[in-house]
Image: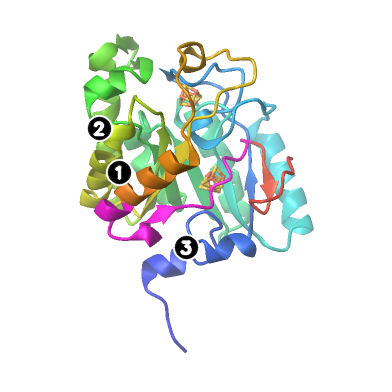
């Protein structure tokens, strides 16, 4: 029997990491993580984390125990369920107890399910041991800039270790932590996806540099998602007159990334910017 290489083996039934798999497999998002530790200028905190979602919709927050009940329900209903993810509605690692407890209970029930995490990366390096132990093998880090000057236009503040950092100082800490986590996780065999929110005039010229860093540290795939304003225009960027990218802007950014990442297969194109409580196949709009 033909065996796949270890990475292909790990992504073959993950609907986000493998384009073919998204037509076959379902994911379940468990919204156990309400708090966040940074403030992105495209987020107003009323909605799900925009890094892995679309604004204008909210997710209710559930406890780890409720999350396990929901998992057990969908494990029966969805025969093609292959991934359980935590992606908000805030940042999973700003809620480490709820996130890790949920994954621990699910791992004890199901040793084979893919556990998946999407985070801004600020606190990720602190939990490498737990990630390894729980066999969380798919992690997304949202990296919107690798230059702190550009980052300072995207992040209003960064809170860590009981302090709040602003401007370039805050962005520098976040970027360093993101790259550190990317490198540590890849060394541990975790498949790391990097999301970038494309913000015209703010980070459009930064896409190649981000892709170069992803490639250098062994990230698996780059997912460039468009900035979307919430309908109530309540974010800093929506009030500042920054427009979402056009289809052409998005295509150009993806080409620039592909040139650095080593091909178009290394740039995700089928992301649906789904909610933190989404369930089912990626194209479905069902929530838990
Ligand atoms: Fe969920 Fe994200 Fe895991 Fe996928 S979503 S935590 S990696 S299982 Fe997928 Fe949804 Fe796009 Fe995310 S389509 S928003 S990339
Ligand atoms: Fe909002 Fe997510 Fe940014 Fe936190 S990381 S401020 S929840 S978009």
Residue tagged by mark 3?
Answer: 11
Q: Please tell me in which quadrant of the rendered image residue 130 appears.
A: top left
Numbered disc 1: secondary structure = helix
Magenta segment: does it hold 272? Answer: yes
User: Which region of the structure is painted magenta?
Assistant: 258-276
Q: Nearer the viewer, residue 126 or 150?
A: 150
Numbered disc 3: secondary structure = helix
Residue 210's place in the image compared with 1, above or below, is above
**Residue farthest bottom in this picture:** 1
* Nearest to viewer (mark 2 / mark 3): 2
**Alpha carbon distance from label 1 to label 2:** 13 Å
Q: Is residue 18 left or right of residue 201?
A: right
Q: Nearer the viewer, residue 208 or 25?
A: 208
| Residue 277 picture location, percent across and down | 66, 37
Residue tagged by mark 1?
Answer: 182
Residue at point 56% right, 31% down? 88
Q: Nearer the viewer, residue 107 or 164?
A: 164
Q: Earlier in the sequence, mark 1 or mark 2?
A: 2
């Amino acid at each position: 029997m033909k065996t796949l290489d270890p990475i292909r083996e790990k992504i073959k039934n993950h609907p986000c990491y493998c384009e073919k798999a998204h037509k076959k497999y379902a994911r379940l998002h468990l919204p156990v993580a309400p708090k966040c530790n940074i403030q992105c200028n495209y987020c107003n905190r009323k909605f799900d984390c925009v890094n892995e979602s679309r604004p204008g919709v909210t997710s209710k927050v559930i406890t780890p125990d409720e999350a396990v009940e929901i998992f057990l329900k969908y494990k029966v209903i969805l025969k093609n369920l292959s991934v359980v993810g935590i992606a908000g509605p805030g940042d999973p690692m700003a809620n480490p107890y709820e996130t890790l407890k949920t994954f621990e209970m699910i791992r004890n029930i199901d040793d084979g399910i893919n556990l998946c995490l999407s985070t801004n990366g600020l606190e990720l390096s602190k939990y490498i041991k737990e990630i390894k132990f729980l066999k969380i093998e798919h992690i997304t880090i949202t990296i919107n800039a690798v230059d702190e000057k550009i980052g300072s236009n995207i992040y209003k503040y960064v809170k860590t270790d009981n302090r709040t950092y602003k401007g370039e100082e805050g962005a520098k800490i976040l970027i360093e932590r993101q790259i550190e986590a990317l490198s540590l996780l890849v060394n541990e065999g975790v498949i790391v996806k990097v999301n970038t929110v494309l913000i015209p005039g703010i980070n459009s010229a930064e896409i190649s540099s981000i892709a170069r860093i992803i490639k250098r540290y062994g990230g698996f795939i780059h997912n460039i998602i468009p900035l979307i304003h919430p309908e109530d225009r309540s974010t800093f960027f929506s009030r500042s007159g920054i427009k979402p990218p056009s289809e052409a802007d998005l295509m150009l950014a993806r080409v620039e990334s592909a040139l650095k990442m080593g091909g178009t297969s290394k740039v995700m194109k089928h992301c649906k910017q789904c909610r933190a409580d989404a369930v089912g196949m990626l194209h479905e709009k069902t929530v838990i």
